[in-house]
Image: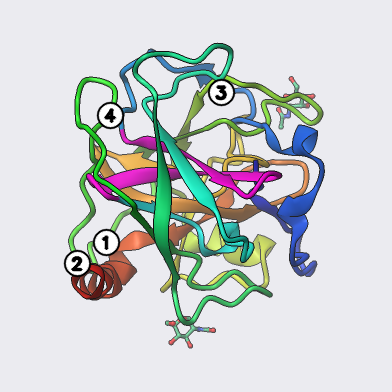
Amino acid sequence: MLLLLLLSTGVLPLAGQFLLPPSVFSAAVIRGEETSPTSRPYMAYVQIGSTGSCGGFLIQEDVVLTAAHCNCNLDKMFVYLGVKDFIEPAHNWQRIQVRRWVQHPDFNNENFDNDIMLLKLLKGAELNDWVATIRLPEANQAISPGTACSTAGWGRTGANTNTDRLQEAEQEVVSDSLCKERFQYYNSTTMLCAGNPHVNKSASQGDSGGPLVCDGVVQGIVSSGTLDGSPPSIYTRISNFIPWITETLQKLS
Ligand SMILES: *[C@@H]1O[C@H](CO)[C@@H](O)[C@H](O)[C@H]1NC(C)=O
Ligand SMILES: *[C@@H]1O[C@H](CO)[C@@H](O)[C@H](O)[C@H]1NC(C)=O
């Protein structure tokens, strides 16, 4: 269960931070709401070795996108699809091993620039009511402040509260300047700023790698934020990475 990398201004991320004890990782969206069973069929729970996890989302039946910082060089990763909660195994779960992972070559683990990673699965998922792909944006598609979006994850639901249930929260796109003020490393070409500071909801530890969905299209990947989880937080700006995604998919096919 990994983390949204918790960076406060000027503080660099700690490599291997997601190797903290599992209790720290099973988290969700702070003060979000529980999802209905089939409302987010693209959600993937990415299990990293035996101690870590992240969110992710299905973009092809055998491809999941997540954050580059969710890699920890362990040999085995699995994705769980069709999961709403981890309370009891359900018939709609699909657990598939990751065959190859490709981190963005320019991922910077000090400032989390280019925080995107593609996971090629050992076999294609079976698509049904619980498991489905989500649409990517057009290359360089602009997204204006004020756009209503939402995120979801199994991350923390409060400062010290974990959950096994998928949670979701609205996240409005806000201006780049709000993130620039707050995070010295914010780069508006590769990052997207979302989460209205006046609304008490945000992505949190354990949500890393999860999607920011706007109008049925995935525009962002949960990447980093503040230690206390207060909005706004930083998402990878997916529209900037469409050429890289296309090229990588071709190489992997
Ligand atoms: C922001 O990212 C772009 C694309 O990777 C890069 O060309 C640019 O130099 C970066 N800007 C800063 C201030 O680092
Ligand atoms: C957010 O909610 C928490 C818990 O309900 C509260 O302690 C905190 O003061 C709130 N923050 C804001 C900015 O409203």
> Most prominent secondary structure in the magenta stretch?
strand
What whole-number distance in Å separates the C-alpha atoms at marks 3 and 2? 37 Å
Left or right: 9 in relation to 137: right
Q: Name the N-terminal-most of marks 3 and 2.
A: 3
Of helix, strand and loop, which one carries label 3?
loop
Residue sitting nearer the eye, 8 or 4: 4
Please name the amino acid that badge 4 sits on: Val
The answer to whether residue 206 is visible is yes
**Residue at the (26%, 61%) spot, across then down:** 142
**Residue at the (33%, 51%) spot, across then down:** 122
Quarter assignment of residue 248: bottom left
Magenta-span inclusion, residue 50: yes
What range of the chain is rendered magenta? Answer: 42-62
- Other-residue count near label 3 (Cα within 10 Å), few / some / many at <14 / 14–19 / ≥20: many
Please name the amino acid that badge 3 sits on: Gly
Q: Are marks 3 and 1 in contact (CB under 8 Å)?
A: no
Q: Mark 3 = which residue?
A: 32
Q: Which mark is residue 253?
A: 2
Mark 4 or 2: in front is 2
Please name the amino acid that badge 1 sits on: Ala
Mark 3 or 2: in front is 2
Q: Mark 4 = which residue?
A: 131
Of helix, strand and loop, which one carries label 2?
loop
Number of labels in the image equals 4
* Residue 55 % position (x, y): 50, 42
- Other-residue count near label 2 (Cα within 10 Å), few / some / many at <14 / 14–19 / ≥20: few
Of helix, strand and loop, which one carries label 1?
loop
What whole-number distance in Å separates the C-alpha atoms at marks 4 and 3? 22 Å
What whole-number distance in Å separates the C-alpha atoms at marks 4 and 2? 21 Å
Please name the amino acid that badge 2 sits on: Ser
Q: Mark 1 = which residue?
A: 142
What whole-number distance in Å separates the C-alpha atoms at marks 3 and 1? 26 Å
